[in-house]
Image: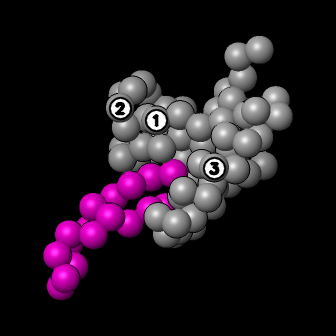
Amino acid sequence: MNMAPRYVLTDRFDLGMLSSLTSDITLTEISLDQVCALIEKAELERKMGLHGGWADGIRAHDPIELTPHGPILLVAQTTETAQGAMMKWVQVEVID
């Protein structure tokens, strides 16, 4: 059975992706450790047949659609800080 992924890693996100949504979204800053834990959990749940695990949207470059009950985005964003470039992560989820 080919099921949709629960999480999609991506480095592309803009507010235009939200323009056609009639639902609410949540944006939550998360750490790299949390990203890794979510991927490990998604792989376990995929093996149990609950959903399609996770997808690498960074390498695939397929367009990602935000929909209610669709995949949760884990967005990587490079941010310049006083210590240099840092990778920040945001979890984007559509809620009804």
* Main secondary structure along the magenta-highlighted residues: strand
Asked if marks 1 and 2 touch (Cβ < 8 Å), the reply is: yes
Residue drawn 66% across the image and 36% down it: 53
Q: Is residue 45 left or right of residue 75?
A: right
User: Which sits earlier in the primary sequence, circle 1 or circle 3?
Assistant: 3
x, y percentage for residue 55? 53, 34
x, y percentage for residue 75? 44, 52
Could one spot residue 55 in this view of the protein?
Answer: yes
Position of the N terminus, as image quadrant, is top right
Badge 3: residue crowd in 10 Å (few <14, some 14–19, many ≥20): some
Q: Nearer the viewer, mark 2 or mark 3?
A: 3
The residue labelled by disc 1 is 56
The residue labelled by disc 2 is 59
The residue labelled by disc 3 is 40
Marks 1/2: CA–CA distance: 6 Å
- Closest to the observer, 33 or 21: 33
Badge 1: residue crowd in 10 Å (few <14, some 14–19, many ≥20): some
Task: Determine if the magenta segment contains residue 66.
Answer: no
Could one spot residue 69 in this view of the protein?
Answer: no
